[in-house]
Image (tube, rainbow, N blue to C red):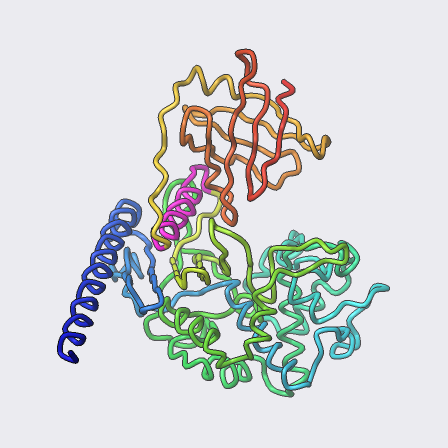
Amino acid sequence: MKKIISLSLCLIAAIFSFSQNGTNEQLEKSVDSLIATQFKPNEPGGSILIADKNGIIYKKAFGSANVELNVAVQSDMIFRIGSITKQFTAIGILQLVEQGKISLQDSIQKYIPDYPSKGYTITIENLLTHTSGIPDYSNADTTHNQYIERHDFTPQQIIKYFDYMPLEFKPGTKYNYSNSGYVLLAYIIQQVTGEDYHQYMKENVISRAGLQHTLFDDEHTIIPNRVEGYTRDKGFFENCEYQTASLAFGCGDLMSTTEDLYQWNKGLLAYKLVSKETLNKAFRPYKLNDDSYTNYGYGWFVDSFGVKRIHHEGQVNGFTAFEEYYPGKDVYVSILTNQLSGEDTTDFSDKRFRLFNNVFQLALGNMLEKEATVNDALLDEYIGTYQAVIKKSETLTIYKEQGKLYMDLSNKTGRHMVMQPLSKTLFLLPDVMRIRSTAEFIRENGKVTKAIFTQEKAYEWIKIK
């Protein structure tokens, strides 16, 4: 009997292994075919890793790490990861919370006494969740100092660059992404621990997670396997503009590899860095004072891509980075590239974002949605201005360029967003990255009268002209 049971178990294992390998092979072919058309060997490239509960199932690199020297990207090469840095800083803060050295409800003035309160209590939690109202210094007017990105800054100098600015709103009442908050958090880590932020993070966060190839950027240090960054402007690639890493203190100054980011996610889920209770809070959308929710926790975006996802994006001169975790499916994806589109007048950047969206879809085991063919006469009927039924002050404009529909929102949250036809009436908005968004046109008495836009919920817009 024991031999029969053992043989049965072996057969089941073999069948599962064949099925799993077959799935992985199909995934590899599908991702390869997507990437091959977009990343040429003599152009800037990237590195992609996909993992599921069984481990890494896809890990490849494409394109060039150094175009001038014709050096190909390898999977273990190091890229700047921009704002993905924020989750590392958040974990550093949350460790101090668990140690009882700070509280999420502490006012930031407790640790930075000379920071102006502007008449409100701004908490550590407000900084973590981008609900402080403090303006993003990276969006500040730099016309008085056009070479600001070439200077080396101390943390205090960066803070002085924005501490005089008025709050954009009362803390806790709104969400507005702000790099300034994470500069302050990194500085608070220094103030509380008495250690240099970078050294503290290396010893207590990066090393504790077992990361071998994650380090803070330093333009003056030789870093083996560091890739060069490029930008695409006016239709061709260029070396990216120099940008001091010191200007991204605590909010965008880390470098890493796709596999190290995967190990980081594994370390978090194994509770090597903070407790399960604390991590659950970090992965939970923040509730505003009016009981509505944002789509950001403590260092991570939290929303839906058909299924729940916990993720972040990073953009810094010459580099873009993405990492996404889908807890319901236990699927993880990291994508690092050494290119960033600047003032490109083509839709190059949009195409790349759509490409990565498709990689995420494939990683989840989804079939890619195929674009339908819709004739020009029908597209022309959809052109016009539409008014929101719920908020009548908001409108959207749909127009056509080179045989495709595009959309602009009056509130300026979306501009030149392509509308990809899935059928004659249903269109996908692939430029809306964080939530799958569609528009369905409704015809009444032979005329297009409205459009139903769906982002988890359906919203009706009436065609007014």
Q: Please give the name of the residue rendered at 50% of the width and 63% of the height, measured from the top-left corner.
A: 82
Q: Residue furthest right?
A: 119
Comparing 123 with 308, the one in front is: 308
Stretch in magenta: 344-363
- Does residue 123 lie above or below 413 as drawn? below
Q: Residue furthest front?
A: 1
Comparing 238 with 251, the one in front is: 251
At which x and y percent is residue 333?
Answer: 39, 60
**Which quadrant of the figure contains the N terminus?**
bottom left
Q: Please give the name of the residue rendered at 53% of the width and 18% of the height, measured from the top-left corner.
A: 443
Comparing 43 with 290, the one in front is: 290
What main secondary structure does the magenta stretch of the protein show? helix
Q: Please give the name of the residue rendered at 17% of the width and 76% of the height, measured from the top-left corner.
A: 6
Viewed as shown, does residue 29 lie left or right of 251? left
Q: Please give the name of the residue rendered at 65% of the width and 80% of the height, measured from the top-left corner.
A: 97
Q: Report if residue 151 lies within the magenta region.
A: no
- Tell me which corner region of the image, top left, top right, bottom left or bottom right, holds residue 177: bottom right
Viewed as shown, does residue 274 lie left or right of 129? left
Does residue 151 appear in the picture of this structure? no
At which x and y percent is residue 340?
Answer: 44, 52
At which x and y percent is residue 352?
Answer: 39, 46
Viewed as shown, does residue 80 lie left or right of 56? right
At which x and y percent is residue 259?
Answer: 35, 70
Does residue 284 appear in the picture of this structure? yes
- Does residue 428 lie above or below 246 as drawn? above
**Which quadrant of the figure contains the C terminus?**
top right
